[in-house]
């Protein structure tokens, strides 16, 4: 591979359900891509396959949300017509995990891998035409790694996955992680207390999330802490990461207000880009878009 050509990097935004991943990516797109997404309209955002924008003169970002639209609209036949019926696998999994956890997690790993492969392969196909100082960053919501060591692990511990189902998913994960398409350069962990995300989930009232309990959120939080804070070798030796584990995770306190979380995210990303020599310290930063509270104050004046 010719190292003088354009370069590809991947950043994964990680965290518990309701920690603010989608809102953060929507704000990022609003600031740099000017797509005018409503941060509260998660359905609109998750119907998008990918969005590209320039973060800097020599840095292009490609954002891909979680493929929720695939998990909630699975066609039941091969024929695509007006009579087509769909299944909401995400809702089935939350309602009856003992029956649907294996099916969902298998499909979840597949769709995440396809997402990672699509962006990686597009870059590889076009990299010979790119300038050598051009950097492309795939910014994605979660990864196959938090999927495996967070959600799959939880279902195994709680008994929703049988030992043979767990083993099959583990072998499938090993097959996927061995491929270059699953390489990650940086994980950004939005570390948020279970009580905080539980309240956010209650307020946003997504139909598929009605069955989520506090106990479930605490278990997922504990597994995220192990993956991104403790970082044991038995896990990180199985992660296709471009750098050392101590330099590959940025932790952001997600308990703060969204505006503070977003500002911390931008600052940390810029620092990482500077250390990676992708961006210069004299780059003029764009101010973040006004929060809803600031917009209301401006309208009153």
Image: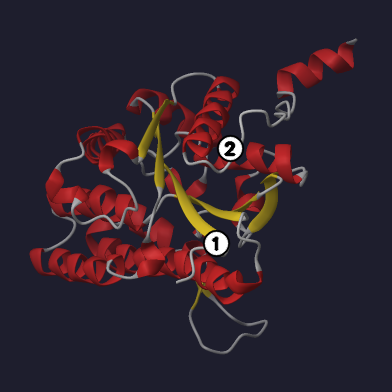
Q: Residues within 10 Å of mark 2 (few under 14, many from 20)?
A: many
Q: Is residue 40 visible?
A: no
x then y, percent, for residue 246:
27, 36
Q: Residue at x 60, y 22 (%)?
A: 259
Q: Quadrant of residue 133?
A: bottom right
Determine the CA span between mark 1 and mark 2. Answer: 17 Å
Work out which residue is located at the far bottom of the displayed protein and give it: 79
Work out which residue is located at the far left of the displayed protein and give it: 163
In this rendered view, identify the residue nearer to me: 155 or 174.
174
Residue beneath disc 2: 23
Marks 1 and 2, the one that precedes in the sequence:
2
Q: Quadrant of residue 163?
A: bottom left
Relative to 248, say whether 69 is above or below.
below
Secondary element under disc 1, as helix, strand or loop, is helix
x then y, percent, for residue 42:
60, 46
Q: Is 43 displayed left or right of 185 in the figure?
A: right
């Amino acid at each position: 591979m010719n190292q003088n050509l354009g370069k590809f990097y991947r950043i994964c935004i990680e965290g518990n359900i309701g920690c603010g991943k989608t809102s953060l990516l929507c704000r990022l797109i609003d600031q740099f891509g000017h797509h005018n997404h409503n941060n509260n309209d998660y359905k609109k955002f998750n119907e998008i396959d990918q969005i590209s924008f320039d973060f800097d003169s020599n840095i292009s970002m490609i954002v891909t949300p979680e493929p929720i639209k695939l998990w909630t609209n699975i066609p039941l036949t091969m024929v695509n017509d007006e009579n087509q019926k769909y299944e909401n696998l995400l809702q089935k999994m939350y309602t009856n995990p003992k029956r649907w956890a294996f099916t969902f997690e298998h499909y979840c790993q597949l769709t995440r891998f396809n997402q990672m492969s699509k962006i990686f392969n597009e870059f590889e196909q076009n990299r010979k035409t790119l300038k050598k100082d051009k950097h492309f960053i795939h910014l994605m919501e979660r990864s196959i790694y938090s999927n495996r060591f967070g959600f799959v692990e939880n279902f195994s511990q709680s008994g929703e996955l049988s030992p043979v189902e767990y083993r099959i998913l583990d072998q499938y994960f090993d097959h996927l992680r061995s491929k270059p398409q699953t390489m990650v350069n940086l994980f950004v962990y939005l570390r948020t207390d279970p009580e905080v995300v539980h309240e956010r989930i209650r307020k946003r009232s997504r139909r598929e999330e009605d069955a989520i309990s506090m106990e479930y959120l605490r278990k997922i939080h504990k597994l995220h802490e192990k993956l991104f804070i403790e970082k044991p070798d038995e896990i990180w030796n199985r992660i296709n990461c471009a750098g050392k584990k101590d330099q590959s995770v940025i932790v952001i306190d997600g308990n703060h207000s969204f505006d503070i979380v977003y500002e911390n995210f931008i600052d940390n990303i810029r620092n990482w880009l500077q250390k990676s020599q992708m961006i210069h310290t004299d780059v003029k930063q764009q101010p973040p878009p006004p929060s809803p509270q600031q917009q209301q104050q401006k309208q009153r004046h």
